[in-house]
Image (tube, rainbow, N blue to C red):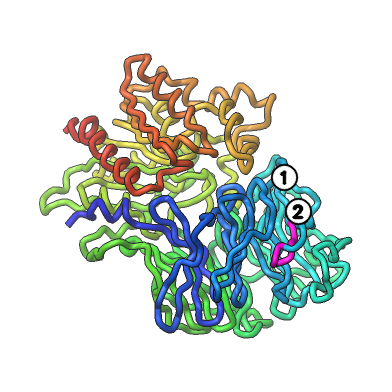
Amino acid sequence: MALPLNRLYLAHTLSEPRLLAEALFYARRADGRTAIYRQSLTTGLAQAVTTEPAPSGGVGYGGGLYAVRENLLVYAGKDGRLHRVDLNTGDQRPITPPHGGVAAPAFSPDGRFVVYLAEQDDRCNVLVVDAFGASLPVRLSENPWYAFNPTLSPDGRCLAWMEWDEHAMPWDESRVVVAYFAQPVTTWGLAADPLPLSLLTLGRPGYAFSAPQFSPDGRHLFYASDESGWRSLYVTPLDAPDLQTAAQRLDLGPGEAGGPDWVPGQLRGGWAEGGRALYALRHTTGRAHLLRFAWPTLAVSEVVTGWPWLSELALSDNRAALLVGSPTQPEAVITVDLPNGPAVARATSAVGVCDPAALVTPEVIQFPTVDGRTASGIFYRARVPAGGDAPRPTLVLVHGGPTSERTLTWDAPAQYFATRGWHYLLVNHRGGTGSGRDFQHLLDGQWGVVDVQDARAAAEHLVWLGLADPARLVITGASAGGYTTLMALTQDPDFWAAGVSTAGISQHYDLLIGSHRFEINYNDTLLGRLPEAGPLWKARSPLTHVKSVRAPVLLFHGRDDRAVPVQQSIDFAEAVRRQGGVAELVVYEGEGHGVHREANRRDQIERMERFLDKYVLARQ
């Protein structure tokens, strides 16, 4: 049985689980609209607690939507303000003036103040405002290019956040700032009372420091750093003369602690059990594990959840909440009673019921790269009738980012096509994450080269195994994966039968005009700094080589895309057509960076199927 089409376009997404007493909170996005839900852990009743304006993290790619304490919820609204909702009465009011965008609110220990991120005037700062909005906010950070994840110590003595400079990305070089207040929060009358601040910084040039969290007694700081070569977790006493020298690394075993900081508000771990244990997530080879570290001995054990993929860990004193997934079960929010379970599913992103036995269980494969290294992928083998083992048409998907990875979690398009006779391979090319810092940096200066090479090498590996039909290989991807798709069609014009790009980049220079600020300088690392790297920017632009394109290409783009302007796809499609090639372009009104509305998601998959039927399957 093939996965029904409606399981793709009607499904919703879940994110940012949080725990408060006997309630679970999470964000749910459906049909392009987000709401924050409160669910009783006793009765299971779930209710949306936000209406207008819709929650929308306005910093970078979003995220960091809300904070909750006792009967109050504060959330980032689409109007660029923080809004306060009384969960008992429903009373709602804004507590900040409009900013360019707001995100990642966090309550002070006494609940009277809220720290948050505000993006304004080409900077992203940490601000503080009283929780009732009775006075204007006060800036606490020193005007960094970006700040993420502000968190207050439980004793009210200090605040920590991560920040980075203009020509870096947070996973390349960032730092953790610890700000000691002039007086504890409990003595504040106004938001300006913590000033002046005394600042300490944890960081090293060329390394990423992130995700600060305080211990329940306010005596220790927990943070992530990749200075060991792997994204690891550290704990340091706040009374040490040198916080960084005194830091102790948690031994996670093979793998990394979480992923790159694309959005604020994603938690990687912290204390629970009344401060008797630290919990953290370890990611390795597409899987994730929940680890418990006894405190202060740091003796480690694994908490078994029964799910291969775990992310967005949130902790209360006696429970953990996580976003989980598996290749045969859509993403869900679960809670785990600490320290040993059980794990209970609380909310699901699924629509309808699917028999897991009718779906495809993927396998992690490895393949050689042109430089003698090894890259990996997640391979969904086509489900075909008995005797139908001839080489199959194959879709090769390149992930976005490009600093990211594909994991063993639910992938509806992969299941959709694999249950219809297509092999589907998710490529984790050199330069992605999850395999250490050195592997991640293999893309520096090489974007448009190693990703293109690895997509082809992955496909060739399947051909060599006798699985893929060399005449029916299709490359696809969104955002950075869309860029690799377009670039691959110009560099290997006779290898790919077709390409499908969503929000792909076609010209690097024009990306500087209209792209959002978060990654406006990302190419400084991926290609090189201007003006010296100008020739390389041109050489690595698919539009420069568009005359080489011979395979049909299908392009999707949202009209309101702030990350990759829609003109990027328009220009590429027009250039292909001018030379007599086949380029189908679909622009969705009201969509941004991606396709989120149900009608458009259905249209996208149906158009893609018709395109593949016409230009690929017809080549049998």
Q: Is residue 565 left or right of residue 6?
A: right
- The residue shown at (73%, 80%) is 217
Residue 549 position, x and y percent, is: 37, 22
Q: Is residue 564 visible?
A: yes
**Residue bearing the label numbered 1:** 123
Q: Residues within 10 Å of mark 1 (few under 14, many from 20)?
A: some
Q: Name the amino acid, label 2.
A: Arg
The type of residue carrying mark 1 is Arg
| Up/down of 272 relative to 240, above or below | below
C-alpha distance separating marks 1 and 2: 22 Å
Can I make out residue 283 in this image? no
Q: Choose between 167 and 37: the one closer to the eye.
A: 37
Residue nearer the viewer, 369 or 241: 241
Give the residues drawn in magenta, as a range: 127-133
> Mark number for residue 113?
none
Residue in view at x 41 percent, y 39 percent:
455
Question: Quarter of the image containing the N terminus?
Answer: bottom left
| Residue at x-position 73% and y-position 59% | 176
Which x, y percent locates residue 172? 65, 48
Residue identifier under label 2: 204
- The picture quadrant where one finds residue 458 is top left
Tag 2 secondary structure: loop
Crowd band around label 2 with a 10 angstrom C-alpha radius: few (<14), some (14–19), many (20+)? some
How many numbered marks are there?
2
Choose top left, top right, bottom left or bottom right for residue 136.
bottom right
